[in-house]
Image (cartoon, rainbow, N blue to C red):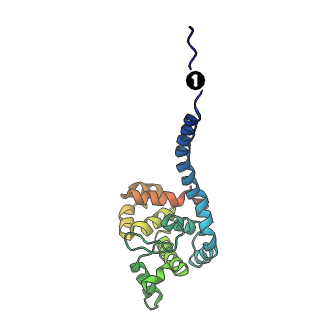
Amino acid sequence: MPLKPANHRPSLLTALLILSGLLLLVLPLALRWTYNQILPEWRARPYRPLILQTANRYGLDPLLLESLIWRESRFNPHRHGAAGESGLMQIRIDAMRDYCHAQRIPPMPPPALVDPATNLTIGAWYLARAFQRWSDRDDPRPFALAEYNAGLINARKWANDPTRASAATFQSRIAFPTTRRYIEDILSRVPPPPGVK
């Protein structure tokens, strides 16, 4: 009696298992793309008029400011960081005190930091101050962003160079990988200003 050839057709169950496996591989990539590409655009929309107004007030690039907010809080005005940062631009209470002192206004209560207008005003003031400090550099953006993220002392330490290090050299000297990534993330979303490569 001749043997019957084995049935090599995959069963419906096998096909469903293969399809499920492919979905499990593709779904995280699709969610990550959505989170990084579509969500920031959607979440930024209600804040754009305020970002534009605040950026103009402090002489900042609105796209840079928006990119910084995306990196800091993903446009969540109620976000709180592990080191006590709050709001859209992740402002700390000591930065709020510096702002109040510089503006000669009474101290604000800490809950004021979750107000988007207050948070953006203080954050943009702080960033603009950093831009002024580094304005003599070939591209002040990495220097100012490093100061915003890691503080003035660290930014000065990485920039300490009598030859006025270029932005690229400065970035290679940044000792904190998280600060290096922070700058790269923000600048990757913003076209360079004229004259900067």
Count numbered badges in the picture.
Answer: 1
Which of 197/95 is in front?
A: 95
Looking at the image, the residue that sits furthest to the top is 1
Image location (x, y in percent) of residue 33: 57, 53
- Residue at the spot x=50%, y=58% of the render? 185
* Element type at mark 1: loop
Image location (x, y in percent) of residue 182: 46, 60
- Residue at the spot x=44%, y=69% of the render? 148
Residue 166 visible, this orientation: no
Judge whether 109 appears above or below 45 on screen.
below
Task: Say which quarter of the image contains residue 85.
Answer: bottom left
Residue type pointed to by label 1: His
Residue 176 visible, this orientation: yes
Circle 1 residue? 8
Judge whether 113 appears above or below 160 on screen.
below
Judge whether 70 appears above or below 20 on screen.
below
Image location (x, y in percent) of residue 103: 48, 87
Image location (x, y in percent) of residue 126: 47, 76
Which of 106/85 is in front?
A: 85
Q: Quadrant of the N terminus?
A: top right
From the viewer's perspective, is 66 left or right of 146? right
Which of 90/140 is in front?
A: 90
Q: Quadrant of the C terminus?
A: bottom right
Task: Say which quarter of the image contains residue 23.
Answer: top right
